[in-house]
Every structure is written in structure tokens, then in C-alpha cells.
Image (tube, rainbow, N blue to C red):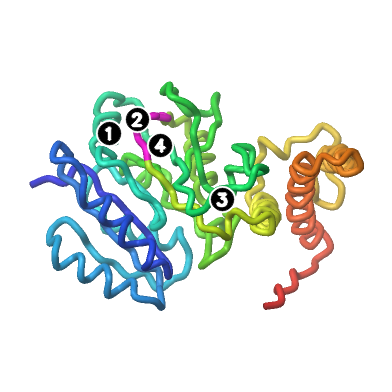
């Protein structure tokens, strides 16, 4: 029987979260099209292999186990793409639980929209503990959450809104024609702030490919306590800045006044305004506003620090453990 959808899940040292994620994938509604789940063990050192192998035994033909030694999310996803059998390849994460009709909705949208090459949907939070008042939707990006509302719309070069890998699907021809996920911008082990999804979107937009945001395609993500801490958000924004410096996205770097030490000149102007905003909100006893300004400054430091090291030929010093 032909496989309609291949689901790829790359995982690293998260066996405690992986079990419910796989259970949700294997418990799709009876109306679901024929699908397979490929779990890529990205060189884990915990009980991931044993867990998945035990589930493979109980779900022959539905669940497949792969091992990818090269460390990094893109390496793991690409191993899954290479092994996938279906013309539609969907991705989710090991801390995510897909809805019971997830595979069905993905197949229905691709069938109804022959002009689209990719699609994504909502990634909603499953809070392990209540979030602090400052953690509003403004700060959802480091949590890998997404909700653009309840109306479908196209995502293309004219409407550049990001979709994320926890709830992302493609026609296989995308990878045949545009290539797989780049390894230069991937998350490695527990690194944060990576841009493998955004880099793929940039290639799609440059190639004039069209995607879809569908609010009917829903997953929930477990928000671990670490991600509720301001320290995590500070690290994420600094890392995000470093990855953006490597990405060289012409849309955000285009400047009418040139560059200074490898950094687009308008970045300095934005940083000055942000710094003044941080001072004003700090003195005005507006801590939440001050924190938002601080995060933008940390992004600037991550970005500019990377470019300054390139400009002056310096190497980045490894972080102390």
C-alpha cells in the first residue's frame, strides 16, 4: 500500500519526553491516510534507542527507527528525508504532541491546495508550571510557539511569516529541487536560537514557492521550566543574533548607509534607540518593558559580535562550562 505521509522526528537525549510524543503520532484517527513515522536518534546517550525499538516491535510497518551519528537537528531531519517513502514529508519535535487528526489535516490541505509546496499550523503551549506575568506572546519565539489566528492564509515572498519545525510539512519535491536542511544554521545538542527552519523558508521564498498557514493543523508543545526563566530568553536572543549574522538575510541587512565593521549601519541606530528605551523604562520602573529592550540589545550583541570577529579576523572564544 502506498504511503501518503512520512512523519520525521529527530531526537536527542529526550527519552522522557519522546514517549508521549510518539504515542500521539501512533494514535491518529482511523480516518488518517496511510502514514509512517520515522524516528531519528541523533546520537543520543540516554534510553532513546531502547524506547523506540520497543515501540517499533509493537507497531511494525508504522514506526521506523533510524540512527544519525552526525550531531545536529538538520543532520537528523535530512536522514529522515532520505529514508522517507511518501510524497508528503511532515516534521514535529520530541517535546510535542500532535492532535489526533494531525496527519489527516496535513493530507487534506495538500490535496485541496495543489499550488502549495509547504504548510504549517499552530504550536500551542502545554505549561508544566504557570508562566510568569512577563511571559506574554511577545516572548513566544524562544519557546517555539506559534499562533497566527483562526484564518488560513498563504505564506510566500509577499507575506514572509515564519512557520516552525514542530509543525511543518513539505511536498517531497521541495527537497529534490531546492535541497535539504542546511547544517550551518542548525541546533546542535542543546543549543538554542538556531535558524534551520527560517533558512529553508528563505530558499522557498526566493524560489517563488507558496505555502499555507492552516489553523486546523495543531500541535501542543511542553514548555519545560528552564524556558520560563529570563536567563533562557537572554541566551536564546544572543544565540539568535549569532545565527542571523551567519545567515546574511538580505531583507534585514539591506542598508542605504552602508556597513560599519561588517554590521549594517542601521543596526547601530536601532541599538542606540533600544538602549535609550532600556534606560528610560528601567528608570521609570517598567521592568517588563525594560526586559524587552534588553533582549533586543542581546540580539544586537550576538549579531554584531559575530560580525566584528569576522571583520577583524578574530576567533570566538569557547564558552566556559
Q: CA distance from mark 4 to mark 3?
A: 16 Å
Q: Earlier in the sequence, mark 1 or mark 4?
A: 1
Q: Main secondary structure of the magenta part?
A: strand
Residue hosting label 2: 216
Residue hosting label 4: 120
Q: Nearer the viewer, mark 2 or mark 4?
A: 2
Label 3: element kind:
loop
Label 1: element kind:
helix
Label 2: element kind:
strand
Using the image as rendered, state which of residue 43 and residue 47 is in the foreground.
Answer: 47
Q: Residue at x 86, y 39 (%)?
A: 281
Label 4: element kind:
strand
Q: CA distance from mark 1 to mark 4?
A: 11 Å
Rendering coords of residue 304 (x, y %): 79, 53
Using the image as rendered, state which of residue 130 and residue 13 is in the foreground.
Answer: 130
Determine whether, in the image, residue 280 is placed left or right of residue 311.
right
Q: Earlier in the sequence, mark 2 or mark 3?
A: 3
Residue 195 is tagged as 3
Residue 305 inside the magenta-drawn segment: no
* Vertical relation: 45 (above or below) 85: below
Q: Earlier in the sequence, mark 1 or mark 3?
A: 1
Residue hosting label 1: 105
Which span of residues is magenta-colored? 212-218
Residue 301 is tagged as none
| Label 2 Cα crowd, 10 Å radius (few <14 / some 14-19 / many 20+) | some
Q: Residue at x 42, y 52 (%)?
A: 180
Q: Earlier in the sequence, mark 4 or mark 3?
A: 4
Q: Earlier in the sequence, mark 2 or mark 4?
A: 4
Rendering coords of residue 177 (x, y %): 38, 43
Amino acid at each position: 500500500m502506498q504511503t501518503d505521509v512520512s512523519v520525521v522526528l529527530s531526537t536527542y537525549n529526550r527519552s522522557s519526553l519522546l514517549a508521549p510524543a510518539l504515542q500521539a503520532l501512533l494514535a491518529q484517527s482511523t480516518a488518517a491516510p496511510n502514514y509512517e513515522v520515522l524516528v531519528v536518534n541523533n546520537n543520543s546517550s540516554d534510553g532513546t534507542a531502547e524506547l523506540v525499538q520497543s515501540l517499533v516491535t509493537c507497531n511494525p510497518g508504522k514506526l521506523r527507527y533510524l540512527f544519525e551519528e552526525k550531531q545536529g537537528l538538520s543532520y537528523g531531519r535530512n536522514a529522515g528525508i532520505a529514508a522517507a517513502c511518501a510524497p508528503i514529508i511532515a516534521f514535529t519535535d520530541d517535546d510535542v504532541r500532535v492532535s489526533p487528526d494531525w496527519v489527516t489535516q496535513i493530507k487534506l490541505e495538500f490535496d485541496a491546495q495543489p499550488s502549495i509546496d509547504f504548510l504549517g499550523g499552530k504550536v500551542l503551549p502545554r505549561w508544566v508550571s504557570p508562566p510568569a506575568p512577563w511571559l506574554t506572546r511577545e516572548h513566544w519565539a524562544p519557546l517555539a510557539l506559534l499562533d497566527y489566528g483562526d484564518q488560513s492564509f498563504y505564506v510566500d515572498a509577499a507575506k514572509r511569516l515564519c512557520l516552525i519545525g514542530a509543525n511543518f510539512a513539505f511536498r517531497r519535491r521541495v527537497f529534490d529541487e531546492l535541497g535539504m536542511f542546511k547544517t550551518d544554521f542548525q541546533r546542535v545538542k542543546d543549543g538554542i536560537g538556531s535558524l534551520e527552519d527560517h533558512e529553508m523558508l528563505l530558499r522557498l521564498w526566493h524560489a517563488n514557492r507558496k505555502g499555507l498557514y492552516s489553523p486546523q493543523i495543531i500541535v501542543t508543545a511542553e514548555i519545560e521550566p528552564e524556558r520560563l526563566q529570563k536567563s533562557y530568553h537572554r541566551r536564546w536572543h544572543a544565540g539568535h543574533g549569532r545565527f542571523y549574522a551567519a545567515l546574511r538575510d538580505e531583507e534585514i541587512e539591506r542598508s542605504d548607509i552602508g556597513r560599519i565593521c561588517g554590521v549594517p549601519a542601521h543596526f547601530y541606530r536601532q541599538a542606540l534607540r533600544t538602549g535609550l528605551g532600556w534606560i528610560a523604562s528601567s528608570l521609570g520602573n517598567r521592568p517588563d518593558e525594560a526586559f524587552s529592550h534588553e533582549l533586543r540589545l542581546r540580539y544586537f550583541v550576538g549579531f554584531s559580535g559575530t560580525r566584528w570577529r569576522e571583520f577583524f579576523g578574530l576567533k570566538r572564544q569557547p564558552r566556559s562550562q
